Amino acid sequence: MSLKIIGTGMALPEKRVSNEDLSAFLDTSDQWIIEKTGIKNRFICTKESLTDLAETAGRTALEKAGLKPSDLDLILCSTISGDYTTPSLACCVSQRLSATCPALDLNAACSGFIYALDAAAAYLNSEKAKNILIISAEMMSKHIDWNDRATCVLFGDGAGACVVTKGTALRYINLTADGEIRPLHLKTGTGNNPFRKINEAQEPFVMEGQEVFKFAVQSIEKEVARALDTLALTAKDIDYFLIHQANQRILDSARIRMKQPDNKFPANIHQTGNISSASIPILLDEMLSEGKIKTGDTLLLTAFGAGLTTGTCVMIWE
């Protein structure tokens, strides 16, 4: 597997929304939200488009990689929904960057960043690309019911990006999908088709919390074990577990089950909420900016989301 990350970036909206802000119109409280989720704040788009966030994250990643948009051979965006149904978010970013390479979106929900890494690895291994920009960007605020405290307190908006090229950092990657729709889904409408007996309006995001929590905990345990067994490693050999930032209780459960210390499970969910596929690349960029990740560190990234999908990979940082 020929892949390494040579630059990262992130972007968050200007508007920070606290638990106190939510309690002004919801039957909830700062204490309740923290106890149930670990979330204190999240960032919500009020004037930014998703393309704005994706462009900013992508430009930062390119600058850190020392590359220009003209050096790119492919732009991959993971998102559940861009600013347009078509063109893709990747094409919108390409126009902003004045890039001339192919560009496409990929939707694997919260697992999207790992899915995008896998797709990038395939392009690099086939020598169809040399430099690839991956952007995971999500505007969950436009998909949730802001009267439903069970979901609206969880999510935030943002974008994380990285530039990948050939290297030996990626040592393992595995994706799964079981096709289960019911516990986690966002249904589109059918428009005003005059030939359809019943037309349906678009619905807000649906999440069956307890079932999703159970799936998340079980998938982390299963997929981490699979990765470690494949590489003949133990949890002690991993320097950092970068887990999709869905709920602090999920992260704590995974850490306790693996009997590992807190410092190996970095988290930013308290400040950003759940940003779907953007959560891991944003966390990765923050850690790199803070100098926490060093050359030779072993990272295990794992995510889970609607589909029901999972994505897990192991990197030795170059």
Image (tube, rainbow, N blue to C red):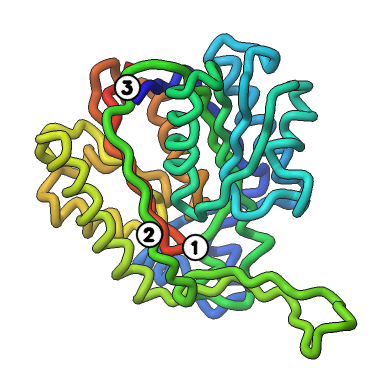
Q: Nearer the viewer, mark 2 or mark 3?
A: 3
Name the residue carrying label 2. Answer: 247
Contact? badges 2 and 1 (CB < 8 Å): yes
Residue 111 appears left or right of 260: right
In the figure, 116 relative to 124: above or below? below
Return the residue nearer the eye: 128 or 270.
128
Residue 263 appears left or right of 115: left
Name the residue carrying label 3. Answer: 169
First along the sequence among labels 2 and 3: 3
Residue 37, percent across and down?
A: 39, 63
Q: Amino acid at mark 3?
A: Ala
- Furthest-bottom residue in this view: 197
In the figure, 165 relative to 235: above or below? above
Which residue is depicted at the point 54% across and 36% down? 160
Which residue is depicted at the point 52% across and 62% down? 19
Residue 129, percent across and down?
A: 55, 20
The Cα atoms of the two marked residues, 1 and 3, are separated by 32 Å
In the figure, 171 relative to 197: above or below? above
Name the residue carrying label 1. Answer: 154
Q: Secondary structure at mark 3?
A: loop
First along the sequence among labels 1 and 3: 1
The Cα atoms of the two marked residues, 2 and 1, are separated by 8 Å
Contact? badges 2 and 3 (CB < 8 Å): no
**Screen quadrant of the N terminus:** top left
